[in-house]
Image: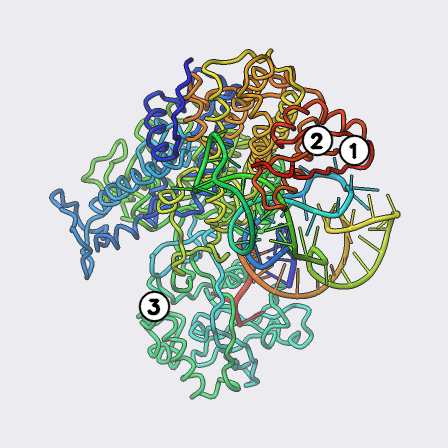
Amino acid sequence: MARNIPDKPSLEGLEEKWNRHWESRGTYRFDRSKTRDQVYAIDTPPPTVSGSLHMGSVFGYVQTDTHARYRRMAGKEVFYPMGWDDNGLPTERRVQNFYGVRCDPSLPYDPDFVPPTEAQDPPVSISRRNFIELCHGLTEEDEKVFENIWRTMGLSVDWTQTYATIDDHTRRTSQQAFLNNLVRGEAYSQEAPVLWDIDFQTAVAQAELEDRERPGTYHRVAFHRPDGAAVHIETTRPELICSCVALVAHPGDERHRGLIGTTVLTPLFGVEVPVVAHELADPEKGTGVAMICTFGDTTDVTWWRELDLPTRAVIQRDGRLQEETPDWLEGDGAAAYGEIAGLYANQARRKMTELLSAAGNLVGEPREIVHPVKFYERGERPLEIVTSRQWYIRNGGREDDLRKELLERGEHLRWVPDFMGVRYRHWVEGLNGDWLISRQRFFGVAIPLWYPVLDTGDVDYESPIVPSSEQLPVDPGSDVPTGYAESQRGRPGGFVGELDIMDTWATSSLTPQIAGHWVDDPDLWERVFPMDLRPQGPEIIRTWLFSSLLRSHFEHNGLPWHTATINGWILDPDRKKMSKSKGNVVTPMPLIEEYGAEAVRYWACNGRPGVDTAVDFGVMKIGRRLAIKILNASRFALGFTTADVDPQAIAEPIDRSMLAGLAGTVATATEAFERYDYARALEVTEKSFWGFTDDYVELVKSRAYEGGPAAASAHAALQLAVGAYLRLFAPFLPFVTEEVWSWWREGSVHRMPWPTVAELESHAGDGPVLEAVALVLAEVRRVKSEARRSMRAAVGIVEVSGEPDVLDAVRLAETDLVNTANAAGIEYLEGEFAVRAELAESDE
RNA sequence: GGGCGUUUAGCUCAGUUGGCUAGAGCACUGCCCUUACAAGGCAGGGGUCGGCGGUUCGAGUCCGUCAACGCCCACCA
């Protein structure tokens, strides 16, 4: 094809130009005629669609894109979908704040509802369906914005393969998988104490917990034995003395051996409770005797379950102590309870402290401490523990066999970097209960069940009514189970719909099944599953990665992917963790505008796999400079000719030497990509390329301007090298490489075969000629630079000392060296390597 | 309390199985408007490789230990 090289190549507008082109040509469209062994499938993380995109996302997605592009060029058909995580609390919150609304599921749907144009204060209450419509509306807008950013960043995603975690297909997939779990006994419901967020009004799973250091106060409280002797305990939650069901001490603790098996009376309330023994009681803490309440913390739950203690709960779902006097209190105890009834836990705590003190049950001064307290990761107040009926999926937290199987799955997964596998192992080993998947929220995938209402009016939770696969997705709140009529909802002999939705991870854990259309396209499914790659962040190994592996283990008895790449954490330019609360979040768009998409990509590709990386504008500048260099160097190298020169013309030793070095670069870069080390592949390519432009191109410049076979050799070598470099850079810098490719080649560089050693080696050889000559040239340049002269300044005879093989190598490129150095000639001396050059008297 | 990671030039980072005077870019200094590129090129100064101890002919690299920082996990009495 004729060469069409611009005079003044530029990066401006390349993103838009090539994105349009790729879209119209379907460059990245998945060819579903390919079979599984020909396909490379990526389980792309669906970014949370909640406002602006974070640099951390850009970082990871660009790194993944380099793998997608490499694999595509290396001969695989790449299945590279994109999902949007628009399901769950972030979206709910965003809608609440954006419009100033709150969901009240008891309200009827208002078909004429018009969303407020600005946030309302106080919030307007709307029905669940209206609320969900607002969620959909807002996320659709956000998804467009996100897609635009990803396209601008040059992700080679197949944009016809998208999904949203709340769309019908996803809900159907999620509900089907849940029903399969139910049938196989992997999902079950249970009435049990759960960690509860009193603000979000929902149960919370272990994976969503975090400990936060909070100030607290140790109160030393006296309980009394029937003979009046005091037994001291320490507690940070004296408001729960009314919920006390026992005291506990370690069985080996000599100090309290006599107490075990006796009973004591609780202060103020006068409830008789046993003193029991349990290994978890820590003799080092407090007095060595602890109060067991239902429920102050998760240890209480353990004790309650293992010691078969009664339940005396007073904390309600709103975080207040119940109004009515508990039935286990009477007399003075009931009166004492009246003082704290209806209060929030922290208010009741202060009140109890006063009461205990007044009654002489508080020993010494309360002691201020800082201790870890469990929070929902998105929550603002400590979690409480309430008893409720919830749905669970088994995850090995209560079964050693399953736990072992899951640990073994983790061993078979390839982790990049490999130490990330340790985090998975620790998580699985540390699980202490099954996966709680039900949430008492509004915007999410409904648990697809109804329950019969018995003639007595009681709901029979043990016999759920299950929809057929064809009915999915269902909304049990508005859909009616087969065999019933809407009029029977909530009536004796009728049914009720399950109100809870599923945890967001219960759906996200199925991204391979969603993207691969497990439920409705078996033909596609068998071409892409199990997938090759799961790229993701380190902080969601315990959630997304683990739960995906679990679902695949149950559903397909195998791993969902062969490899998991875990990207590093992103820090702001001052190496602080970026977070919204610190206000130091850097967003990509302004950077793309300032430095260009390729510069931002270059920065992301410079972060080593799994290594925390700071946002660094300096690195982006280098990336921009590299992209410009590719334009200019290619323009120069290709500009000597108007059509391809036969590679057979490559005969000059230095040309062959350059190509030998390039073949080595190809080998190293390929090997690095196979190890998922994109950063190494870029590094060696870049280093090789700068040597190519700084030394090789300078050395052959004068020859290339002349005619004849020697020039033809240079022309062909330049062209061969540019062809290889463009492909080596293509995974990193997709726009500029495509631009240059289009000057002289048909088709997209991104669908070209990855460069191979084989294609270069027949034109390569002759030993380290280029290396040797480059060393001499560097010395000559240094002489000129120290003399503060132009690089064009003439020098006299250059004396090169060296081993015979080095001298031979230099001789093979003598003409190029003499011309480039503007030297009178070369003199060769055997000996240690040295170069002597003197400037000519005058080069005026 | 446990685990993982990091610590190399003023800054941001490479350094792949231990091997010749430890590399790059930015920043700094000097020179060059050389016909691909001045949003460039050429060259230069700058490092007790976190501390201590060990293995080895040889350690930035392996082992032990300590420290700082970051992340993850942990039964809140």
Res. A129 visible in picture:
yes
Judged by depth in the image, the label closer to the viewer, 2 or 1, is 1
Judged by depth in the image, the label closer to the viewer, 1 or 3, is 1
Is residue A414 found left or right of A178 in the rendered image? right
Q: Are marks 2 and 1 in contact (CB under 8 Å)?
A: yes
Kind of residue at badge 2: Ala
Q: Which residue is mark 1?
A: A802
In percent of the image, x 36 and y 22: which residue is there? A26
The disc at residue A607 is none
Q: Which residue is mark 2?
A: A772
Sequence-wise, which precedes: disc 2 or disc 1?
2
Q: Is residue A731 above or below residue A602?
A: above
Task: Name the chain under label 2.
Answer: A
Is residue B9 found left or right of A184 in the rendered image? right
Task: Name the chain under label 1.
Answer: A
In percent of the image, x 61 and y 27: which residue is there? A819
User: Mark 2 and mark 1: span between their CA atoms?
Assistant: 10 Å
Q: Residue furthest left?
A: A112
Kind of residue at badge 1: Gly
Q: Which residue is mark 3?
A: A320
